[in-house]
Amino acid sequence: MRVLHAALPAALWLALAAPALATPAAAASSTSRFTDRELTNGFLWTVFGLEYRSWSWKPYQVKKYEEPVRFFVINLGRRDRTRDARRFIASLPENVRGLNVRFAADAKSSNFQVYIVDRAQYAQTVREHVYRSARADAPGRCLVRVESGSDGITNSTAVIVSDEGEHLFRRCLVEETLQGLGPMNDDDRLVHSVFNDKSDHDTFTPFDRMIMNMLYDPRIKPGMNARKVEPLLPMVIHDARRRIR
């Protein structure tokens, strides 16, 4: 996955999913096989930085929702995948402590829009609903754009491709939804994670559940840098382990 940052007022983030993508079901296996060092690295590698580097310092700050995340799913593809997407989204609060998820009545009242499209609709949907520019490029196989300010994420927009196989749909749904909640970077070293384009994961893995629980721990604040976050991680990891079995 490539991740781009544009120098725009509210820190606009774009995560582009590549060949491999992710599934709705949350795994339930133990996290004891992951060391504290692995989890610390996983957090630092996904929460800070962007795969495609820019001169901006914004990638090196924590990005997360402080207000309730109000999802709205818009299915534009031939096959109606709304129920699949809503089922995964509805499972997030039980798997991520501190994440407040709701469903909005319409796109206007939402702050996280999920567009489900066929490949033929992808470029137009990205231009119209993500970039809002008819001349914009539409890279990647799926993507999510995150708008974030000093008080946290204000809006996310994901575009998920529906008609190129179950694996791609599931991986897109999981990876882009999770990245839209804050951990925007990918890293090839994360063998247990969907935040790695070379992995074949298409579920919300135990490792990624740990990363998300660490991010949504109340001690981790939007705008914090790695220097401020790292001393907190041993206790954050300890508490997350107690919640995830």
Image (spheres, rainbow, N blue to C red):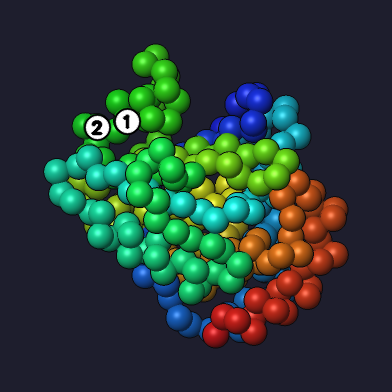
Residue 190 vs 115, above or below: the answer is below
* Image quadrant assignment for residue 6: top right
Q: Where is residue 138 in the image (x, y as percent from the top left)?
A: 39, 27
Q: Where is residue 53 in the image (x, y as percent from the top left)?
A: 65, 33
Residue that mark 1 sits on: 125
Q: Is mark 2 on a helix, strand or loop?
A: helix
Q: Residues within 10 Å of mark 2 (few under 14, many from 20)?
A: few
Secondary element at image label 1: helix
Residue 134 rendering spot, x and y as whole percentages: 37, 16
Q: Which amino acid does label 1 sit on?
A: Thr
Location of the C terminus (image quadrant): bottom right
Which residue shows up at 66% across the image and 25% down it? 9
At label 1, counting other C-alpha atoms closer than 10 Å, the crowd grade (few under 14, some 14-19, many 20 or more) is many
Q: Distance between the residues labelled 2 and 1?
A: 6 Å
Residue 121 circle label: 2
Q: In this view, does 1 lie to the left or right of 83?
A: right
Q: In this view, does 104 lie to the left or right of 228?
A: left
Q: Label 1 near label 2: C-beta < 8 Å?
A: yes
Which mark, residue 169? none
Q: Can residue 25 be seen in this view?
A: yes
